[in-house]
Every structure is written in structure tokens, then in C-alpha cells.
Image: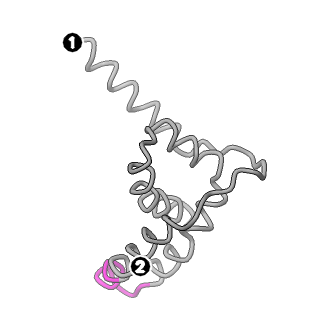
Amino acid sequence: ITHMAIVYSLYAYEYVWMNQGHGVVMRTGLMHHNWAYFVGYGIIMSLVISSATSYFMGVCLFSLMFPILIVSCHFSTPQSTVKHMSLPIFKPAILVTDKLMSLTNRR
């Protein structure tokens, strides 16, 4: 549930960050340093969807709630004034992607 909360937050904030011109490094840095905010931001959607009785119901709930999450992103700002422990949740994916890209660039 926590993982899905972070993923839903990332999906929603992706639209805002793309419009602001933030690169991938900055976006993942924001997620790593403000992970508590993003868990809290997506936890309600994660809990509601995980409590769905069927896959179809979960997809319907996602399609109803996700636009609300996107719109609310435009009116919220992750606060980085509180110093939390950085949680590099995307580090494994970044390392694998970098390794695969370096292998394809050698050819």
C-alpha cells in the first residue's frame, strides 16, 4: 500500500513537474527527499483502491480518483523545510536503467 501511494503521487505530480520543466533527476530527488509527503499524498487513493472487491472495481475507482489527484497537485507544494531521512526508492531502477543504457551506447 505504501509503495502504491508513492507511485500514485509520482503519477499525479508528473504532470505538474513536466509543465514546470523539471528533469528526471530533479523529480526523483524530490521524491527521495520528500517521501513522507508523497506517501501521505497518495495513501488515501491507495487504501481505497486496495479495498476494492474486484480488479474492475479498482480500475473504476482509479479512473474516478486520479483526475482529482492531478488537479489537487496544481494547488499543493511539497514542503521540504522539515529534514527527513532521504529514502532513495528509485535508486535500484535508476542503476539498472543506467547500466542498460551504457551497454546499448557502447555498440
Residue at horizontal 59%, vertical 60%? 38
**Dot 1 crowding, Cα within 10 Å, few <14, some 14–19, many 20+:** few
Looking at the image, residue 16 lies above or below residue 105 = below
Q: State left or right for residue 101 relative to residue 8.
A: left
| 53 magenta-colored | yes
Closer-to-camera residue (51/70): 70
Using the image, tell me which numbered label, if any, was put on residue 65: 2
86 lies above or below 53? above
> Is residue 46 placed above or below 27 in the rendered structure?
below
Residue 3: give x, y in percent of width and height. Answer: 53, 60
Determine the main secondary structure of the stretch shown in magenta: helix
Region in magenta: 52-60
Q: Position of residue 44 (x, y in %)?
A: 55, 77
Of 76 and 49, nearer the camera is 76
Q: In the rendering, at what x and y percent does residue 5 appear?
A: 53, 65
- Residue at 63%, 54% in the rendered image: 35
**Quick check: 15 left or right of 45?**
left
Residue assigned mark 1: 107
Q: Looking at the image, is mark 2 or mark 1 earlier in the sequence?
A: 2
The residue type indicated by label 1 comes to Arg
Q: Pinpoint residue 78: horizontal percent, then vertical percent.
A: 62, 57
The answer for how far apart the CA atoms under marks 2 and 1 are is 44 Å
